[in-house]
Amino acid sequence: MAKLWNLPALLVCENNYYGMGTSVQRSSANTEFYTRGDKIPGILMDGLNVFAVREGMRAAKEWSLKNGPLFIEVSTYRYHGHSMSDPGISYRSRDEINEYRQTKDCIERVKGMLLENGFSTEAELKKLEKEIK
């Protein structure tokens, strides 16, 4: 209906690469979900980059208001199991999880950007983190 009526709709798929115990590579013939919208165009966003998501959603909204529905796949990662009965390590390694934490964690990326660009100091971030916990 969204395409039939050319509605300004943003259809979002959060892809954390794993279903309940199965990777998307084992359960989907086409893992590029943003390409599966038939007549609805799609884009892929880095869901682990808060600025990419903010700007991507801003652009997607503008595009959709003029052109109709848009399918958005937001690529992210899930550190823990899917539920209480899913330990999350039977279908992936601890090394993989640690790799994501060390190289792609969205909070660590933002902290790095804030420090690198002089928007915050290490002491300010530690104080904020302590307040949050």
Image (cartoon, helix red, strand yellow):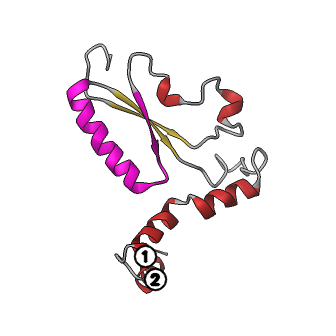
Region of the chain picked out in magenta, as a range: 42-67
Q: Residue at x 67, y 59 (%)?
A: 99
Of circles 1 and 2, the one toward us is 1
State left or right for residue 45 relative to residue 27: left
State left or right for residue 34 relative to residue 64: right
Q: Are marks 1 and 2 in contact (CB under 8 Å)?
A: yes
Q: Residue at x 58, y 49 (%)?
A: 77
Q: Which circle's residue, 1 or 2, is located before the other in the chain?
A: 1
Is residue 100 a member of the stretch shown in magenta?
Answer: no
Q: Amino acid at mark 2?
A: Glu
Circle number at residue 90: none
State left or right for residue 102 relative to residue 14: right
Report the number of discs.
2
Q: Residue at x 38, y 55 (%)?
A: 51
Give x and y (percent) for residue 78. Answer: 60, 50
Principal secondary structure, stretch drawn in magenta: helix
Q: Quadrant of the N terminus?
A: top left
Is residue 49 a member of the stretch shown in magenta?
Answer: yes
> What secondary structure is marked by label 1?
helix
> What secondary structure is marked by label 2?
helix
Which residue matches tag 1?
115
Which residue matches tag 2?
122
State left or right for residue 38 relative to residue 67: right
Label 1 CA crowd tier, 10 Å (few <14, some 14–19, many 20+)? some
Give x and y (percent) for residue 17. Answer: 61, 41
Q: Residue 24: name its quadrant.
A: top right
Q: Residue at x 43, y 76 (%)?
A: 115
Q: Quick one: 78 or 53, which is closer to the camera?
A: 53
Q: Residue 68: name its quadrant.
A: top left
